Amino acid sequence: GENVEQHPSTLSVQEGDSAVIKCTYSDSASNYFPWYKQELGKRPQLIIDIRSNVGEKKDQRIAVTLNKTAKHFSLHITETQPEDSAVYFCAASSRGNNDMRFGAGTRLTVKP
Amino acid sequence: GAVVSQHPSWVICKSGTSVKIECRSLDFQATTMFWYRQFPKQSLMLMATSNEGSKATYEQGVEKDKFLINHASLTLSTLTVTSAHPEDSSFYICSAGRGSDEQYFGPGTRLTVT
């Protein structure tokens, strides 16, 4: 089955700096890669996703890149703000949404 | 659109009792619903996948007789934790899919077994 690894487990940046979180996956059949943001005690919220036919996707300050050959994808947050502080999870799936597996999460802290 | 509710948001029960958690898709029909368990500061662990009208598919290591899942309609799935024990205390989150890849999460239920 799919195995998703995520790094780093914690990340602390200064407000205004960029943050990068990286994930690798094992199943070459995976074709959908979402990123979720989870604030303490709340539900995971989908913030951006990418499919295997695209190498990069951007939405304002958030971007995701995908390297299918290397089987890794990354989340980039630019001009970070304190409200970006949360836990971020990457995930990968290959059969619609029936086999989605999550990374271990990255706790991002943005210091004002 | 794509709102998922979960009830209750928190519950405290005594060891040996059963607890039912409901997951509803409010504005769409969910072809598939998922149940996750999340321990403090840890990731989401998939427990089972359920499709409306059929038996749930449980992940390896998840006791199907302990965690009963019913998906009676396209908008409702329930998870019943039977004979709960303190080690079952956790944050349980459901999610719903509507045919595409995206999953939409409920707000979660914090279960504490005393």
Image (cartoon, coloured by chain):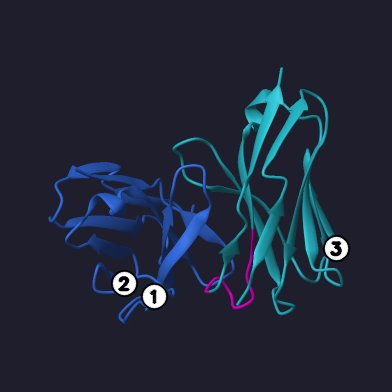
Chain colours: A cyan, B blue
Please tell me which of labels 2 and 1 falls first in the chain. Answer: 1
Q: Where is mark 2, residue-wise?
A: B63
Tag 3: Cα neighbours inside 10 Å, few (<14), some, or many (≥20)? few
Q: Indicate the chain on which mark 2 is placed.
A: B
Tag 2 and tag 1 share a subunit? yes
Q: What is the spatial separation of the Cα atoms under label 2 and label 3, in whole angstroms?
A: 40 Å
Circle 1: residue type = Tyr
Over which residues does the magenta segment extend?
Answer: A91-98
Q: Indicate the chain on which mark 3 is placed.
A: A
Label 3 sits on a secondary structure element that is loop
Circle 3: residue type = Gly
Question: Which tag is nearer the camera, tag 2 or tag 3?
Answer: 2
Q: What is the spatial separation of the Cα atoms under label 3 and label 1, in whole angstroms?
A: 33 Å
Could you say which disc has been placed on residue A55 in the image? 3
Left or right: residue A85 compared with residue B15: right
Question: Which tag is nearer the camera, tag 2 or tag 1?
Answer: 2
Question: Which tag is nearer the camera, tag 3 or tag 1?
Answer: 1
Quadrant of the drawing holding the C terminus of chain B: top left
Q: Nearer the viewer, residue B67 or B87?
A: B87
User: Residue A35: where, in percent of width, then height?
Assistant: 65, 53
Q: Are marks 2 and 1 in contact (CB under 8 Å)?
A: yes
User: Residue A18: where, in percent of width, then height?
Assistant: 82, 34
Q: What is the spatial separation of the Cα atoms under label 2 and label 1, in whole angstroms?
A: 8 Å
Q: Where is mark 1, residue-wise?
A: B58
Image quadrant assignment for residue B74: bottom left
